[in-house]
Image: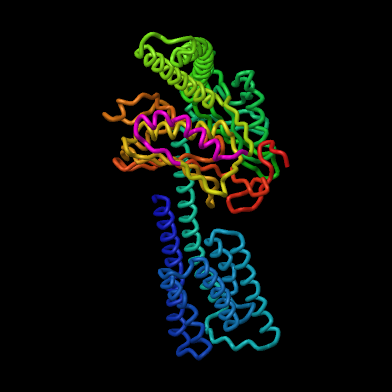
């Protein structure tokens, strides 16, 4: 904002200076016109035009305060001055006129415009006007001069007026130079202020990397005075292992002319090293190899944070590997006795080797068998979740019949459903009788969802499997008329070991892994599992398998019905 105000103030100053010069020229013209009328008398038409030209700069002075571009006004002023001098010279003796010396004022005044092209244009205009006067005189078309004064007096007056006008131009040029010098000094002071107070180290390097300037921030970053860094090469400041990175950045900036950056360790005055980020930018010089401006920032804290993150990642990986080893050992140690417990309890429940001697023993054997199976399911769920998180769970996709898999999943939960008084239904659309997916994973998805549905559906309710095909792919959904889930719990569900809080839920067994496994297995198939529920009305879990559709001829199909290429090693 301050920069815009400064530019506006500078533009206003230039317009006022232009107006002052034009007003001074107009005042001189008025004096000359009055003197001419007093000496010669009433002017004729040609002389009246000349008098109007003498006072015309007043109009340009007024136009300086309008929206007309200043450069256009300056060009108009120079052109009109050259034409006026030529016209006056033609009226007062041609090339021998005492006013010819005024042509020198045209390029001098053009210097106020501030650039060489303006001066050259003004010199050309003055030259053309002089040649035009000479051509008119050569053609014998000059009017007779009515000036009664002797030639030497006329020349003296003309030179005096030229001196006055030149003095005005010189004063204006001096003001311009003073303003330019002040602006340059202010700019230099501003940049020096920024360089002296910046927290980052600012350096200027030659093309070979040697330091030619260093800001006072070197005291904070390196513990060295700026003067001590002058002429030093990068090898004297950078850690030996980081020298190539530093040289590559300087090479990119100097020889290839592109910004570059490097993270290096810089040597401090006490011999220690500090991590720093150096950003280099080329500064081209005419006909020479580019110098380099570099900004160096202390990044020790960031590097320390990165090291902490790396150490934390390594510790997490070690913990994950330890967890995997623990779960593998647990799998072996627990499954072996569980298999014996399940097998022997089943033998006892069916009294294969004779009666147990009492009905309670038979009931207890059945409970032992069920509890063993339940514990085995929990262990398998934990192990499967661990494999998925470790990226070691691999899909074995194939084309298979969905209906038998769904019926097998229903049979798995049939007994607990009958005990809970919950009806089980299966609705498989004809266009998804066959699908392409991992058969075991799909069965596990259905078993987990059916188990949750039966567990949280009150007596007299129902749990239904529905499967169909839409524009997104194959959708397998399990819907129940159970207790439902509140909105605040929907976002939490699906994460490992997360369960809904509530009196009805706390009475049910479970680890909170079922829905998490469903979501993970759906994601591995390129799909998703969406949970929809209303408290007190029921729950629907929709599993989308976008690449599972199969056509009538056994070929895999896209959701829009078009055949797609073989997928994940499937035979063409």
- On the image, the x and y values in percent for residue 193 come to 44, 36
Relative height, residue 279 to residue 144 (above, below): above
> With 29 as the anchor, is 498 left or right in this view?
left
Determine the residue positioned at 46% across, 55% down.
175
> Is 389 colored magenta in this rendering?
no
- On the image, the x and y values in percent for residue 455 come to 36, 31
Query: Majority secondary structure of the magenta segment?
Result: helix
> With 569 as the anchor, is 92 left or right in this view?
left
Determine the residue positioned at 56% across, 49% down.
430
User: Which residue occupies the foreground of this view, 335 or 22?
Assistant: 335
- On the image, the x and y values in percent for residue 388 come to 53, 27
Relative height, residue 176 to residue 261 (above, below): below
Relative height, residue 14 to residue 321 (above, below): below
> Is 422 colored magenta in this rendering?
yes
| Residue 224 seen in render | no
Query: Which segment is the magenta one?
Result: 400-425
> With 344 as the anchor, is 122 left or right in this view?
right
Determine the residue positioned at 39% across, 51% down.
1
User: Which residue occupies the foreground of this view, 59 or 253?
Assistant: 253
- On the image, the x and y values in percent for residue 211 come to 60, 28
| Residue at the outermost left position | 503
| Residue 195 seen in render | yes
| Residue at the outermost right position | 572
Q: Which quarter shows the C terminus?
A: top right
């Amino acid at each position: 904002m301050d920069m815009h105000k400064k530019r506006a103030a500078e533009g206003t100053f230039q317009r006022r200076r232009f107006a002052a010069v034009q007003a001074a020229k107009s005042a001189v013209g008025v004096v000359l016109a009055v003197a001419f009328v007093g000496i010669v008398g009433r002017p004729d038409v040609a002389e009246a035009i000349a008098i109007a030209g003498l006072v015309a700069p007043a109009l340009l002075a007024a136009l300086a305060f309008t929206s007309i571009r200043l450069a256009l006004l300056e060009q108009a002023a120079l052109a009109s001055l050259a034409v006026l001098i030529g016209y006056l010279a033609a009226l007062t003796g041609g090339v021998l006129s005492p006013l010819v010396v005024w042509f020198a004022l045209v390029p001098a005044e053009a210097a106020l415009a501030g650039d060489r092209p303006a001066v050259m244009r003004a010199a050309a205009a003055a030259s053309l006007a002089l040649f035009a006067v000479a051509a008119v005189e050569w053609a014998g078309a000059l009017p007779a001069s009515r000036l009664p004064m002797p030639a030497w007096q006329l020349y003296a007056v003309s030179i005096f007026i030229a001196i006055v006008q030149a003095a005005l131009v010189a004063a204006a040029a001096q003001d311009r130079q003073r303003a330019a010098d002040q602006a340059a000094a202010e700019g230099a002071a501003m940049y020096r202020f920024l360089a002296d107070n910046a927290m980052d180290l600012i350096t200027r390097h030659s093309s070979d990397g040697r330091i030619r300037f260093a800001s006072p921030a070197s005291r904070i970053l390196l513990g060295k005075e700026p003067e001590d860094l002058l002429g030093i090469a990068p090898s004297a400041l950078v850690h030996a292992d980081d020298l190539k990175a530093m040289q590559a950045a300087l090479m990119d900036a100097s020889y290839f002319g592109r910004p570059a950056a490097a993270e290096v360790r810089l040597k401090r005055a006490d011999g220690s090293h500090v991590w720093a980020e150096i950003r280099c930018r080329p500064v081209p010089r005419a006909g020479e190899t580019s110098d380099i401006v570099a900004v160096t920032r202390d990044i020790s804290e960031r590097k320390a944070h990165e090291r902490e993150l790396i150490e934390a990642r390594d510790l997490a990986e070690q913990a994950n590997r330890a967890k995997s080893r623990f779960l593998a050992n647990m799998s072996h140690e627990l499954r072996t006795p569980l298999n014996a417990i399940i097998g022997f309890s089943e033998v006892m429940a069916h009294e294969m080797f004779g009666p147990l001697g009492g009905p309670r023993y038979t009931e207890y054997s059945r409970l032992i068998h069920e509890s063993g199976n339940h514990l085995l399911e929990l262990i398998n769920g934990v192990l499967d979740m661990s494999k998925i998180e470790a990226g070691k769970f691999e899909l074995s996709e194939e084309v298979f019949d969905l209906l038998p898999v769904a019926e097998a999943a229903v049979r798995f939960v049939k007994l607990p459903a009958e005990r809970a008084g919950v009806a089980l239904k299966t609705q498989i659309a004809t266009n998804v009788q066959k699908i392409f997916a991992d058969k075991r994973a799909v069965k596990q998805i259905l078993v987990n969802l059916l188990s949750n549905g039966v567990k949280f559906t009150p007596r007299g309710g129902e749990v239904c499997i529905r499967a169909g095909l839409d524009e997104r792919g194959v959708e397998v959904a399990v819907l129940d008329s159970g207790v439902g889930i509140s909105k605040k719990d929907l976002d939490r569900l699906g994460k490992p070991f997360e369960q809904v809080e509530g009196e009805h839920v706390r009475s049910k067994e479970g680890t909170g892994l079922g829905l998490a496994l469903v979501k993970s297995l759906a994601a591995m198939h390129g799909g998703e599992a969406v949970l929809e529920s209303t408290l007190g009305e029921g729950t629907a879990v929709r599993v989308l398998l976008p690449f599972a559709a199969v056509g009538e001829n056994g070929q895999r199909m896209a959701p829009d019905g078009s055949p797609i290429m073989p997928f994940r090693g499937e035979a063409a």
